[in-house]
Image (cartoon, rainbow, N blue to C red):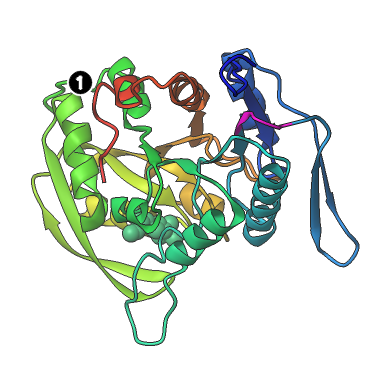
Amino acid sequence: MENGYLTQTTEKRLMLFSGRGYPELAERIAERLDVPLGEVELETFPNGEVYARYLESVRGADVFIIQSLGEPVNENLMELLVMIDAARRASAKRITAVIPWYAYSRQDRKTKPREPISARLVANLIAAAGAERVMTMDLHVGQIEGFFSFPVDHLTAMHTFVDYFVEAGFRGADDAVVVAPDTGEVKMAKAFAGHLELPWAILSKTRHAARQSEVTHVIGEVAGKRAIMIDDVIGTAGTLVGAAERLVQEGARDIRAAATHGEFSGSAYEKIEASPIEEVVVTDTLPPKRGKTSGKIKRLTIAPILASTIRNVFTDESVSAVFMGENQLF
Ligand code: R5P
């Protein structure tokens, strides 16, 4: 101690942990990063409370906690929160919540008096628990990023879909069109159509109730064309199936759909099976539905995107470079 103080050069340490939301996706990410998943004890007590304890030291580490907020949504959310809290209290240097599917993202504003803004509440909870960064994909609206006062890496699966449909021979096809199944998806549909060198069309829908909507207008040429609809999430599949039926009435054929998050709630699988949609392409931000199968649903992995982004965040390199500058689509 020559100058009256101690000096120490420390090495950065990346640690990955998974909640019970979708451990298989976390494994895929870990494999690509060549970093094993850290050991953490996770438990649900008989009274329904969740518990987390890291089985190794996280002191000083750059900790990434991977938890997709699929069903059971509230349990998975609470588990993420206690995992963040435990990491913070165990002196992790920085905690990043990796949330491929951000539940409650559709409740991003008040549409009627006396409603909550649940997407904001979830952001507050994540920040209060002690996260300092969030990584997520294709949020319902980009403004959710502003619900946090720390960095959010808002990633997109669009390039994964572009590669898929280029491979399937759609690029520049003169008989194909990209369709936004509702006006909220126009920006994504335009960007997607641009990459595929295809024209685009828009369906405008009116929502009668939370789970009931109707297509009122079709803007653009769809007659005689093969249509690819693009959306952020498939919930009950009401939006997509309603849009597909309208496209058929308008003379479209060979209807396909791509959506980042395959939530498939309620009887979504059955609706898709019985619909005129030929193929639905989703990513693995959410696990497949247990006990359900559909020959129409194809799943692409976004693990490489998440792994590259985690690596670049850890090494302080550009995240937008992973997406060729195109990761802020919404
Ligand atoms: C709507 O604004 C969203 O982008 C989705 O189209 C919608 O949330 C999908 O929900 P569902 O499948 O239940 O119609």
Q: Which of 186 and 330 is in front in this view?
A: 330
Q: How many labels does the image show?
A: 1
Tell me: 230 left or right of 9.
left
| Residue 126 placement (x, y as % from top left) | 55, 54
Q: In this view, does 162 lie above or below 231?
A: above
The answer to whether residue 25 is seen in the rendering is: yes
| Residue 293 placement (x, y as % from top left) | 62, 40
Mark 1 element type? loop
Quadrant where the N terminus is found in the figure: top right
Identified at 61% across, 33% down, the residue is 63
Q: Name the residue under label 1.
A: 171
The answer to whether residue 252 is seen in the rendering is: no
The answer to whether residue 87 is magenta is no
- How packed mark 1 is, by other alpha carbons closer than 10 Å (few <14, some 14-19, many 20 or more), is some
Q: Which amino acid does label 1 sit on?
A: Arg
- Quadrant of the rendered structure where residue 228 is? top left
| Residue 287 placement (x, y as % from top left) | 61, 40
- Quadrant of the rendered structure where residue 290 is? top right
Identified at 19% across, 45% down, the residue is 187
Q: Nearer the viewer, residue 60 or 86?
A: 60
User: Which quadrant of the render holds ligand 1?
Assistant: bottom left
For the record, the magenta segment spans: 58-63
